[in-house]
């Protein structure tokens, strides 16, 4: 194997290692967000939207 090929392989390994580290961190952050409670204001907004949709569907 030539010296150039060894350098390229080392760079490829470094890139893959960096991508794995980024992936782990993104998964950790996502897991934290998924486990957060839904804010009451957001739940209220969803409830009002559902009620408005139900009113639209009522026969006149």
Image (tube, helix red, strand yellow):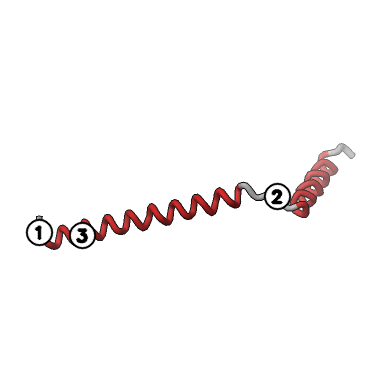
- Specify whether 23 is left or right of 59: left
- Do the residues bearing badges 2 and 1 touch, measured as CB atoms within 8 Å? no
- Do the residues bearing badges 1 and 3 touch, measured as CB atoms within 8 Å? no
Q: CA distance from mark 2 to mark 3?
A: 47 Å
Q: Which residue is mark 1?
A: 2
Q: Residues within 10 Å of mark 1 (few under 14, many from 20)?
A: few
Q: Residue 22's image quarter?
A: bottom left
- Specify whether 52 is left or right of 4: right
- Specify whether 1 is left or right of 30: left
- Of mark 1 and mark 3, the one earlier in the sequence is 1
Q: Quadrant of the N terminus?
A: bottom left
Q: Position of residue 18 (x, y in %)?
A: 36, 58
Q: Residue at x 83, y 44 (%)?
A: 51
Return the mark for residue 10. none
Q: Position of residue 9 (x, y in %)?
A: 21, 56
**Farthest left residue in view:** 2
- Of mark 2 and mark 3, the one earlier in the sequence is 3
Return the mark for residue 38. 2
Q: Position of residue 41 (x, y in %)?
A: 77, 54
**Mark 3, secondary structure of its residue:** helix
- Of mark 2 and mark 1, the one earlier in the sequence is 1
Q: Residue 60's image quarter?
A: top right
Q: Nearer the viewer, residue 33 or 45?
A: 33
Return the mark for residue 8. 3
């Amino acid at each position: 194997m030539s010296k150039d090929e060894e350098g390229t392989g080392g760079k490829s390994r470094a890139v893959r290692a960096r991508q794995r580290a980024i992936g782990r961190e993104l998964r950790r952050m996502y897991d934290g967000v998924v486990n957060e409670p839904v804010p009451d204001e957001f739940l209220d907004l969803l409830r009002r939207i559902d009620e408005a949709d139900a009113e639209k569907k009522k026969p006149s």
